[in-house]
Amino acid sequence: MKIAVMNYSGSVGKTIISSYLLYPRMAGAKFFAIETINMSAADLGVDEVMSLTGDNFGQLVEEIVFEDNAIVDIGASNVERFSFYHDKIRGCN
């Protein structure tokens, strides 16, 4: 299962939910933090967080395609760029 958590507003609990609710319940999940300004899951104790920006959408797709379980925590500072690249790739949903 692959889950993306995103919201255009900041400080609504995306990273908290991703780190404390989803991550412990998804065995072996790879954690991706799409964030440049605010704290990420690494700051909350999640091991091996891959940090990217919204502009690295292609790299995210390459990494996530081989994962069985993945959590993508998209920070408000990167939602716009992430959505821009997401919409350019057909069948990306």
Image: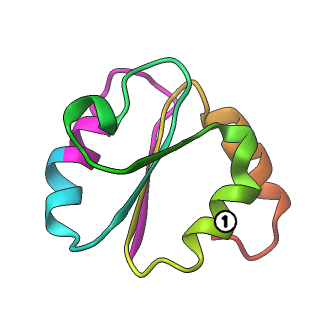
Say which residue label 1 marks.
61
Residue occupying the point 68% across, 34% down = 80
Q: Quadrant of residue 44?
A: top left
Q: Quadrant of residue 92?
A: bottom right
Number of marks in picture = 1
Q: Residue 74 at x, y = what percent?
A: 50, 41
Asked whether the viewer can see residue 56, the reply is: yes
Asked whether the viewer can see residue 86, the reply is: no
Q: Quadrant of residue 2?
A: bottom left
Residue occupying the point 34% across, 21% down = 11
Based on the picture, tell me whether residue 12 belongs to the magenta stretch: yes
Magenta range: 1-19
Q: Residue 71 at x, y = what percent?
A: 39, 59
Q: Residue 19 at x, y = what percent?
A: 23, 46
Residue occupying the point 27% across, 32% down = 13
Residue occupying the point 81% across, 65% down = 89
Quadrant holding the N terminus: bottom left
Coloration of the structure image: rainbow
Give the vertical position of 20 relative to 63 (above or below): above
Give the vertical position of 81 relative to 86 (above or below): above
Quadrant holding the C terminus: bottom right
Q: Secondary structure at mark 1?
A: helix
